[in-house]
Amino acid sequence: MGKIEKAFKRLIKRVVDQLAAPMNTLYIKKEVRDNREVLLQRNMLKETLEGERVLILAPHVDDDFIGCGGAISQYIQGGKAVFIAYLTDSGKRGSKKGQDAIAQQRKKEAVTAANTIGIPLKRLFFLGGEDGNLKNSEILKGLEQVIEETNADTIFAPVFLDTHRDHIHTGLKLMALKEGLEKKGKQSVLKNKTLYFYEAQSPMTQFYSNITLDITPCWHKKERVLECYPSQKTPFHFVKENNRLNGILYNKPYCEVFLKTTLERFYEKISPEKNQLEKLSAPLIAHSGPRNYKRSYQSSKINKKLLDKL
């Protein structure tokens, strides 16, 4: 495909996105109007989130700021300690170079993003799992060490029903870690941890979130950080669209949504279904931009009912 053809296709996508955005607004406004009482009863609007020592679990470089970049910015602004653990080497998607070269490039991007928002290098952890195969990656020892070292009271993870297997298996790794620590008599490592699940490749929808965070004051910071990933050729338009539409319920320009629970409750309620999570996620449609938001949202609304257990 020639450069002119590629540029033309990008132009067409931008035009379609611009036309789709107002339609998405009308769609979500109708959803809010028809379900306002349910949505307001389930969600609580917040300007800040709890937590003094906060650990973000990101399967890949950029998942952290896609899902909770606004929350991270607010924690930093509030003087809280924020740590980020990247579970895989993120080496599958990027330049045309080999996986090792991509992984190194993305590690540099993670450092740049952290520096942009004010997180020192010593608070970043790279656990080195295989991108696309977190399920079979041996990261539990490293994850345990990170949780112990950071002494985090609050953990963020991508919601365990999503379109990427590594996002699903982040939650499953937490379950496996809990089981392993209990066998070793080290339950205290994970005790009394607040757990926030964040949106990743498909909307959570406010039918399943219970926290809506107003990130309007720091949206520009999140947007600036999302420019730190040049290896990712797909623009992050879907992030802005998602955050914009999340705000309609409360008439806020930009919001992130989260499902707040505890690690104990997550394990108790979801572990009986752990072998079904990939199957339950199969019908989900990734949100790639305004043009497919409605389909992605509807697939989440229909297929994420397991989240109601939390």
Image (cartoon, helix red, strand yellow):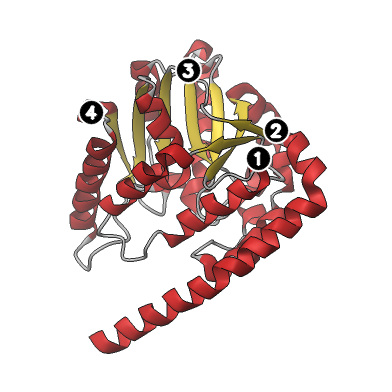
Q: Position of residue 165 (x, y in %)?
A: 50, 52
Of pointers 3 and 4, the one earlier in the residue sequence: 4
Q: Which mark is residue 209?
A: 1
Residues 96 and 251: in front is 251
Residue density around tag 3, few if under 14, some if 14–19, many if 20 or more, within 10 Å? some
Q: Which mark is residue 310?
A: 2
Residue 307 sits in quarter: top right
Q: Are marks 3 and 4 in contact (CB under 8 Å)?
A: no
Q: Is residue 26 above or below residue 90?
A: below
Residues 246 and 294: in front is 246
Residue density around tag 4, few if under 14, some if 14–19, many if 20 or more, within 10 Å? few
4 or 2: mark nearer the eye: 4
The answer to whether residue 170 is visible is: yes
Of pointers 1 and 2, the one earlier in the residue sequence: 1
Three-letter code for the amino acid on which mark 4 is drawn: Pro
Q: Are marks 4 and 2 in contact (CB under 8 Å)?
A: no
Of pointers 1 and 3, the one earlier in the residue sequence: 3
